[in-house]
Each structure stands twice: as C-alpha cells, then as structure tokens.
Image (spheres, rainbow, N blue to C red):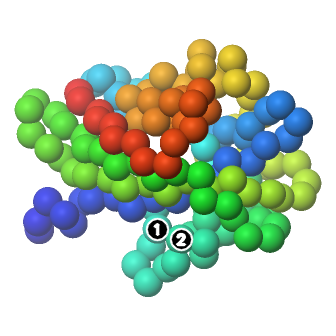
Amino acid sequence: MTLSDHDFVGVFAVLRRAERILLVANDRHIDGKTQRTWDLPGGRVEAGELLQEALRRELMEETQLVLLGTPKFAFVQEGERVAQGVRQYAWRSFFFEVEADGEPVASNEILATQWLTRPQIEAQCRAPYHDSFRRWLQSGGQYFVSDWTD
C-alpha cells in the first residue's frame, strides 16, 4: 500500500438558513484524544463518483436532506495530516454552497445536526482542518492550504 492509498478527496455542503449554517457532529481523534467536532455535512468522494454525486449522497446519508438545484462552488482546501513528523496522508476537499428543503435529521453516520451562526462557528469549529472554512467565511477566497499536525 502506498501513501496515496490513504489520501482523501472530499466534498462538503454549505447550507444556509437565514443567518445560520448547518453543521453535523462527529467524534474525531485530534491531539491524541477523541473530541466532538462540528463539521459541514459531507465526506469522501467514492471511486467513480463525480463531486456533485458525492455531495448529493453525503447530504442525504448524513441529514436526510435532498439537494435542490445545482451546487455553487465555494472553495477548495488541500492539506496534509502529519503525525510524529511524518505525513500520514494528503487531502483535497471541495466546498459548495447548496440549497435543500426540509429540516435535517441526524443519521447513523453523525451524532447530531445544528444550525450555527457565524460567531458560534468561530467558537465551535476549532479542529485543525476548520481553519480554511473560518477564513472563507471571514474574507472569501477559493483556494486554501491547511495542515493537521498531531
């Protein structure tokens, strides 16, 4: 197995309602311990899947929401996860602004859903990979580089 077998290509939905953005709860292993994180709905693009197909599937799997219309590209983030000075994998994540009807329902893939304001996002979204999302909310942009070092 090569290092690239672990690389991650992901797609994530930015769904707004009034002044809030939908986030989903996950438990992640960060800095040597399990931590609850609030993330945008989304996940891994599967082999043979287009970004928009993955976005529709992930939104449905995590929240039971059906994507409406065509997603609008927001930004891309790429980065690396490093542990003990060694790159574990690289990632590339594509973010899209989307629309969907109904209220989200947490599936068995996530722990909860919550609509958060920008100040709440600033306070809650502190995982290493959240830096690009927070910068995009603050000042826009289309390409960000991030790193996650444990």
Q: Is residue 143 left or right of residue 14?
A: left
Instruction: For residue 104, say whether it is visible.
Output: yes
Q: Splitting the image into 4 quarters, where does residue 61 fall? A: bottom right
Identify which amino acid the numbered label 1 is placed on: Val
- Percent position of residue 66, x then y: 80, 65
**Quarter of the figure that contains the C terminus:** top left
Q: Position of residue 95 (x, y in %)?
A: 56, 53
Residue 55, horizontal then vertical, whole percent: 61, 65
Front: mark 1 or 2: 2
Q: Badge 2: few (under 14), some or many (20 or more) residues near its Cα, within 10 Å? A: many
Residue 107 shows in the view: no
Q: Quadrant of residue 134?
A: top right
- Quadrant the N terminus occupies: bottom left
Type of amino acid under label 2 = Leu
Residue 32 point in image, percent of width and height: 28, 24
Residue most toward the bottom?
A: 48
- For the residues bearing labels 1 and 2, Cβ distance under 8 angstroms: yes
**Which residue carries the number 1 mark?**
45
